Amino acid sequence: MATKLSLNNLHKSFGRGKANPIEVVQDFSLDIRDLEFLAVIGPSGCGKSTLLRLIDGLIPADSGSILMDGRDISNKVGGEGRGMVFQSFDLFPWRTTQANVEFGLETNGVPKSERTGIAKHYIDLVGLTGFEHSYPHELSGGMQQRAGFARALAIKPEILLMDEPFGALDVQTRDILQNELLDIWQKEKKTVLFVTHSIEEAIYLADRIAVITPRPARVDRIIDVPFERPRTEDIKSRPEFLEMRQEIWSILKEGIKV
Amino acid sequence: MTKSHILFLNVTGIVMFLLLWEVGGRIAGENLLAAPSIVVFEYIRLLFAGDMLRELVGSLRQMFVGFGLACAIGMPMGALMGRIRLVDALVHPWVSMVVVTSAAALAPIFILMFGTGFEFRVAIVFVSSFGYVTLTAYHGARGIDPKIIDVARSYSTGPVETYRKVILPALFPYLITGARLGLVHATRAMVMAEMFVLVGYGGLIFQTGQDLSTAPLISYLVTLMFVSVGANMGLGWIGRQLAPWYDSKMSAG
């Protein structure tokens, strides 16, 4: 399968005044295949969020390169086929759902007449029909993140970057949104890079899982998830699922120092 | 405490104050401190006489020019100071100086520069409210959540658009607060400036101060107080109308 996004030898360290800088990402290489759902899993604080911010260009890498379909996007901030879904939703509180979803279209110069229709399409897709004119404070956390999805999808990204998008939600909402994400992913045909610290979530959603060792973040190994699609919740109780969860946990455990 | 409790206590406080004032007024006499029972009738008389409201409207009109200028310049400048370190370093000392300088101390030099007319009053109102408007916007701009700026960057929003579509709306509550603070100071400065040159509402107050009875003087002060409180509440109302999300901003997380 063709490679969509390729990360080559990324390095990132953060200065700490006069102390030695901390290496957060070191010699990180990973290829994300076209249209696959790749989960990146690692313990909290292992640098996986930093990794996503590097990929989106929000922070510059010290060295290494990021290629999208072979073209170098290492120094491009945002855009370039990347759509980001943020952990704490980060909707604009002064915009309604409709206006939040239109934001990326607006800054990309899509005319008003087209924006309305595109935004409406994605609002319907994520199940927020009827809440177009609500402000974020009038929506539950789950609904806010639905709007966050719609905002990212509206710019028709080639790759969707998701930074623990369900991390701030309760377990029930999380389960529902996982299923809906799978639905949407099947309909929209997108490459997804999904960062999480939940092993179950990674197995349930992904085609492949990159297990990250903490600080500096490096790929420990890549695990293929064999379950057929479309997936339903009953795979979570299959012996293979439990075995895989155990396997990943034992890899992660080695790297965690509490 | 429920809302009605608070309202009850508010009213009780005002009634107690009025009673004290009434007693004090009876003891001190009308030419030192007119009692509220006298002021009420004087107030109604002045309301119909026309001078009070005419001078007030004239003064407020000039004040709003100065205050409007302070907002038009101070708000974007405060926002730029809060976001761009170079601008901050360049103008912060000046803004601080304007805030700490008493407008009364500037009045004599402004009279020399602008005369005693329209420009003088506008200038005094401007310098007395500009600093509050600017510094409130500045603190708002510094406190903007960096995550929300990241969202803008992630959607490759240019600097001008980020300023217009993210920073300004995020600042909005601070702009309203700054305007409310600025307006209070603008009103004070207007009256003070007019007392220097004996025109407008301030002039009216100054000249009435020479009268035998204090009842008209107190009436003018009461009107001024109503105007300040009313304008302040009006700005708050405008803020809520323009930004329905503002009051519940905290619960949005």
Image (tube, rainbow, N blue to C red):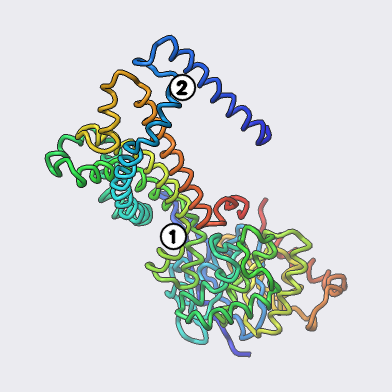
Residue A139's quadrant in the figure? bottom right
User: Same chain, marks 2 and 1?
Assistant: yes
Discs 2/1, front: 2
* Residue B17 badge: none
Q: Residue at x 35, y 48 (%)?
A: B134
For residue B222, above or below residue A156:
above
| Front in this rendered view, residue A116 or A110 | A116
Residue A199's quadrant in the figure? bottom right
Residue with the mark numbered 1: B167
- Which x, y percent locates residue A161? 59, 73
- Which x, y percent locates residue A191? 62, 81
Is A46 placed left or right of B51 in the picture? right
Residue B103's quadrant in the figure? top left
The amino acid at mark 1 is Ile
Q: Residue at x 30, y 54 (%)?
A: B73
Give the spatial CA distance, label 2 vs label 1.
49 Å
Is A199 placed left or right of A99 in the picture? right
Is B73 placed left or right of A11 in the picture? left
Q: Residue furthest bottom?
A: A1
| Front in this rendered view, residue A5 or B229 | B229
* Residue B36 badge: 2
The amino acid at mark 2 is Pro
Q: Residue at x 46, y 41 (%)?
A: B230
N-terminal-most mark, 2 or 1: 2
Secondary element under disc 1, as helix, strand or loop, is helix
Secondary element under disc 2, as helix, strand or loop, is helix
- Which x, y percent locates residue A79? 49, 76
Q: Residue at x 67, y 79 (%)?
A: A37
Q: Residues within 10 Å of mark 1 (few under 14, many from 20)?
A: many
